[in-house]
Image (cartoon, rainbow, N blue to C red):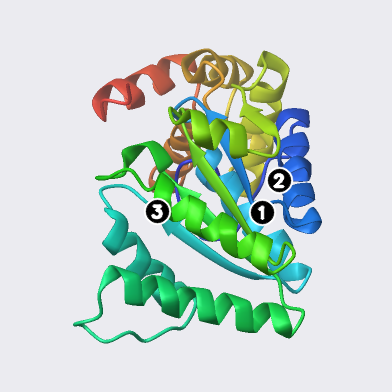
Amino acid sequence: MFGQAIEKPWFFSSSVHTEAVSRLLYVAEQGEPFVFLQGDHGCGKSTLLKQVQAECSRYGHSTVLINLAALDQVAFLWHLCGGLSIVPRVEQSQTQLMSAIRDELVGRSLCNHRTVILLDDFARTAEDIAPIIDFLSAINQQTDGAVSVIAAGESVTSPELQRLSALKVHLRRLTEADTNAFALEFLQFLAVPPETVTGDAVAAIVERAQGSAAQLTRLCQLVSVAVEATPNLVVDAEVLAVLTDEILVA
């Protein structure tokens, strides 16, 4: 499930993505303050964060997942308060919001409870939130590692955050073999009968996707909808080209 929401959870465990999940979980388990997950658009960063969230929850850790796109510092703090079940008053200042967050996180740590904060679209904030990351890192030190922040984006420009990141986790595009396996597994997950998609159609999907998990997801979902809507349809490379051109899949 890279890039698009589908009805049931699905995760493609390529070697690249499995290693990235393992590295991020290591950071959470070791109580490191911050790690940055870097990858090009469409590589599956958002889905990887959701997978990490699911794994952390399975281990009994609290998790908060926030999309930072267009958020400034105050808006981010409000979202974080919501994720931590803090109910601030409307008139509270940024300093008061930060104090409430610190008190909540410190209180959780006294109960031996670990909190993992997952931040998506890090590079698309409306304001630099590095000071808030520093604030959360200070809480990490205060609580002996009970708070960890995992952020994802296409790049991290702050030298301070680069220094703070415990590990380098770079999500690359899928290899051709992984792209092919992704397409076959996801079509099966979507309950597309194998006989309705020809080999050259799968090859065309692989070629069009160019290793992008998000593009693979869209193409496979397009095939699924077409097969479901048109009885006895067999999708070959020519049919796939017509479908993608008609809905303007880039």
Per the rendering, the mark at residue 24 is: 2
Badge 2 amino acid: Leu
Please report whichever mark, 1 or 2, sits nearer to the chain's N-terminal start: 2
Per the rendering, the mark at residue 79 is: none
Per the rendering, the mark at residue 52 is: 1
The reply to whether dot 1 and dot 2 touch (C-beta < 8 Å) is yes
**Other-residue count near label 3 (Cα within 10 Å), few / some / many at <14 / 14–19 / ≥20:** some
Badge 3 amino acid: Asn
Calculate the distance from the C-alpha at mark 3 to the C-alpha at mark 1.
15 Å
Calculate the distance from the C-alpha at mark 2 to the C-alpha at mark 3.
18 Å
Instruction: Pinpoint residue 172: horizontal percent, then vertical percent.
Output: 61, 22
Q: Nearer the viewer, residue 168 or 96?
A: 96
Please report whichever mark, 3 or 1, sits nearer to the chain's N-terminal start: 1
Instruction: Pinpoint residue 74: horizontal percent, then vertical percent.
Output: 28, 62
Instruction: Pinpoint residue 217: horizontal percent, then vertical percent.
Output: 50, 37
Secondary structure at badge 1 equals helix
